[in-house]
Amino acid sequence: MASYKRNANDNRESLFGPNPGSSSAAPKKPASRTKPSASIGATSTTTTASAASTSQTNKTDTRRIKNGVRTLTGQANIDKMKEAEEYRKKAKKALQRTLFNSPDPIAGAMFYHRAAEAYKLCGENRLERLHRIASGDCQMGHDAYATAASEYMRAAELSEMSDEAAERKRAECTKLYADAAKAWREENEMGRAGECMLRSGFSLLIGRGDDNDIILGGQRLAKMNKDAMVVIEAAVENHVPDPLNRYRNFRQTGISSFADPDAEAENGGPSEPDEATLELCRHHMVKTSFAHETVNQAIQKFVEYGEYRSALYAAGAVSALLESDGFSTISLSRVYCVETVLTLALGDVVAADKYFLAVHLQNNNYLSSRECKLAEDLIRAIKMRNVDDLEIARDSNGENRAALSNLDPKVRNAVATLRISGAAKSQTMKPTRADPVTASANPATATPLGAAPPSSMGGQKLENELDDLMNNMGLDSDEEDEDEDDLDLR
C-alpha cells in the first residue's frame, strides 16, 4: 500500500509539479559518500568463513550410497539415530493402554513413520523396513488403507534391496505385497491391488534355482515355481474375469471366481457363461489407465519361463482390456500378434488361423497394421510347412523388421523358436508333457536339447529334419535293414 501511494505521488508531481507544502518540494541534500567501516568488512569476512565451514561440515556429514539415497555420517548420523529412537518410544507409548487412556493408532502410525524416515536418512535398511511395517499395521487399525498399502510396498522394496538371504527376502516380499494388495482392495483400488498381487507372485521367484537358473536364447532353463504361477494367474483374473477371456481354457492353475464348479460337474465340463454372469464380469473388470501394461508383465514373465499356455491366457486378458477401451489401436494390434505367436508356439496352427480370421481381422485398424502382416506370414509359412517362408517372415532385417522390433524381446525370442511342425522348441531342462489341446503337437517331435534348429535352406535340410524325427520315433530304416541282415531265417 505504501508503494502504491508513493507511485501515485510521483505520477502527480510529474504531471502537475511539486506541491509547495509537500516534503518533496524542499531541496534535497546530496548524499554524502562515506567510507565503509572496517567492522562491515570484518562481518562479511566472518560470514563467508562461517558459510564455508558450514558447507564443509555438510559435505563431511553426508555421503551418497549405491542406490542413490543420501545418508548422514558422523555426528549428524548419531543425532538422527537418537531422534529416531525418541520417535519409536513415543509410538510405543501411544499404543499402550493405561487406566485413563486407550491405544491411539493414529499417533502410533505417525511416530513410526517419522522413525522410519529418520532411519532412512541414516541408511538403516532393516530398521526402516521394520518401522514401516509397524506404521502400516497402525494405519490398518484406523482404516487408512491407502497409506498402509504404501508403507507395505515401500517395506517390500527395501526387503528386495537388502542383503538378507534369498529365502527370507522371498518370504518377506511375498507377504508384504499380499498385505498391500489386501489394503488396496479395502480401498476399492482393484487396479493397484492386482499390481501388488502380480508383484507378490514375482517375489516367489526370487532366488529360485540359482544353480540351473540360466537364460539361453532369452528363456530360462529352470521351470517356473507352481506357487508363483498360481498367484500370477490369480492376479491376471483380478484384472479380467475369466468369462471375458477368450483364452480362459489355457489357464493351468486355480478355478475362476466367477465359475460354478457344481454346474460344470453336472454338464461334464466348462459351459458358456450366461448374460448375467458376463454383465457382472464387466462390472469387475479393471478399467484404470495403463492396466494392460501391468498384465503385460505377466506375459513377459511366463514367456521367459517357457509357460506359453499361461502366457496366452494373460494375452487374452490384455486384449479384452484393450477391446473394452474402444480407443486402443497400436497396443491392440501388438497383443493380437502376440496371441498368434504364442498359439503357434504351442503347435496349434489351426487355432491360430481360426482366431486370426474370426477375431483379429474383424478389427479394421489391425488390417492395415504391420503386426497383421507378420502374423499372416507366420501362419501361412507354418500351414504350408515351408521353412524358407518361415525364415523370411521372422528375419530381423526383412519386411517384418518393424513389427518384430515393436514386440517384447522375450516374444521375439519365441518367434525365433517357431517350427513348421509341433510346438516351439523348449529350452527347459526338464521334459514337458504333451499339450492335449493342440492339433498338430506330437510328443515324439520334440527336439532334444542341443539339437540343431531347422535351417532355412529347405530341400535336403528338411529331409534331414524329418529323418531325425523318424529316428526319435524309432522308425530308422537303416537300423531295420541291419536287423534284417542279422536275422537268421534257417
Image (cartoon, rainbow, N blue to C red):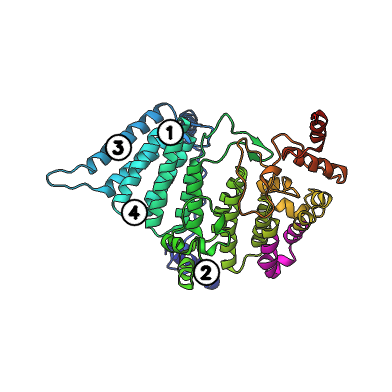
Mark 3: amino acid = Arg
Q: Residues within 10 Å of mark 2 (few under 14, many from 20)?
A: few
Say if 452 sits above or below 336 in the image: above
On whether residue 154 falls in the magenta region, the answer is no
Disc number at residue 144? 4
Of badges 4 and 2, the one in the foreground is: 4
SS for callout 2:
helix
In-front residue for pair 490/331: 490
Q: Could you tell me how far apart the alpha carbons at marks 4 and 2 are, in whole angstroms?
A: 59 Å
Dots 4 and 2: beta carbons under 8 Å? no
Q: Quadrant of residue 133?
A: top left
Of badges 2 and 1, the one in the foreground is: 1
Mark 1: amino acid = Arg
Mark sitting earlier along the chain (3/2): 2
In this rendering, position of residue 410 left or right of residue 100: right
Disc number at residue 168? 1
Disc number at residue 88? 3
In-front residue for pair 59/422: 422
* Residues rendered magenta in the picture: 353-377
Q: Residue at x 79, y 31 (%)?
A: 483
In what quadrant of the picture does the C terminus appear?
top right
Q: Could you tell me how far apart the alpha carbons at marks 2 and 1 are, in whole angstroms?
A: 77 Å
Dots 2 and 1: beta carbons under 8 Å? no
Most distant residue in the front direction = 490
SS for callout 3:
helix
Mark sitting earlier along the chain (2/1): 2
Q: Quadrant of residue 362?
A: bottom right
Q: Could you tell me how far apart the alpha carbons at marks 3 and 2 are, in whole angstroms?
A: 63 Å
Mark 2: amino acid = Asn
Q: Residue at x 73, y 51 (%)?
A: 405
